[in-house]
Image (cartoon, rainbow, N blue to C red):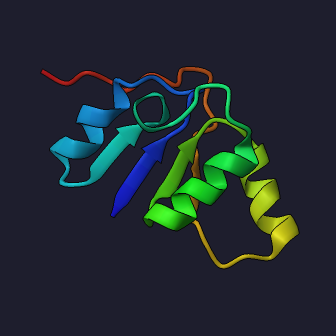
């Protein structure tokens, strides 16, 4: 599984996912930080990623377009930083 971490989440998520065997990249490393959600969705479809975000817009975009992909994981918490385990 390949995970794209949205700009609204910390790049600190990359090693968390990688430590569990997932390929992960933060949007700031592959795209324009000012890109629209539609542009990000087009990128993830083209590259076979899923979106990990704190933004509700991605799920809405997916529903509106009635697309089968990409998958979207939304973190809905006050503290959106990964927990550092020793």
What residue is rendered at 45% in x and 60% in y? 49
Q: Nearer the viewer, residue 11 or 32?
A: 32
Residue 32 sits in quarter: top right
Quarter of the figure that contains the N terminus? bottom left
Q: Provide residue 84's location: percent of width, then percent of height.
A: 25, 21
Taking 33 as reference, is 41 above or below it? below
Residue 82 sits in quarter: top left
Q: Nearer the viewer, residue 4 or 86?
A: 4
Q: Residue furthest right?
A: 64
**Number of marks:** 0
Q: Provide residue 27's location: percent of width, then percent of height.
A: 48, 35
Quarter of the figure that contains the C terminus? top left
Q: Nearer the viewer, residue 80 or 70?
A: 70
What residue is rendered at 44% in x and 66% in y? 48
Q: Is residue 41 left or right of residue 27?
A: right
Q: Provide residue 20's location: percent of width, then percent of height.
A: 20, 49
Q: Provide residue 22's location: percent of width, then percent of height.
A: 25, 54
What residue is rendered at 62% in x and 22% in y? 78
Q: Is residue 48 left or right of residue 33?
A: left
Residue 83 sits in quarter: top left
Taking 81 as reference, is 37 above or below it? below
């Amino acid at each position: 599984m390949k995970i794209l971490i949205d700009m609204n989440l910390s790049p600190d998520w990359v090693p968390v996912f990688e430590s569990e065997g997932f390929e992960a990249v933060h949007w700031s490393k592959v795209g324009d930080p000012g890109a629209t959600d539609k542009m990000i969705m087009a990128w993830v479809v083209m590259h076979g990623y899923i979106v990990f975000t704190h933004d509700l817009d991605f799920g809405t975009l997916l529903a509106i377009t009635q697309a089968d992909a990409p998958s979207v994981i939304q973190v809905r918490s006050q503290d959106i930083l990964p927990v550092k385990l020793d």
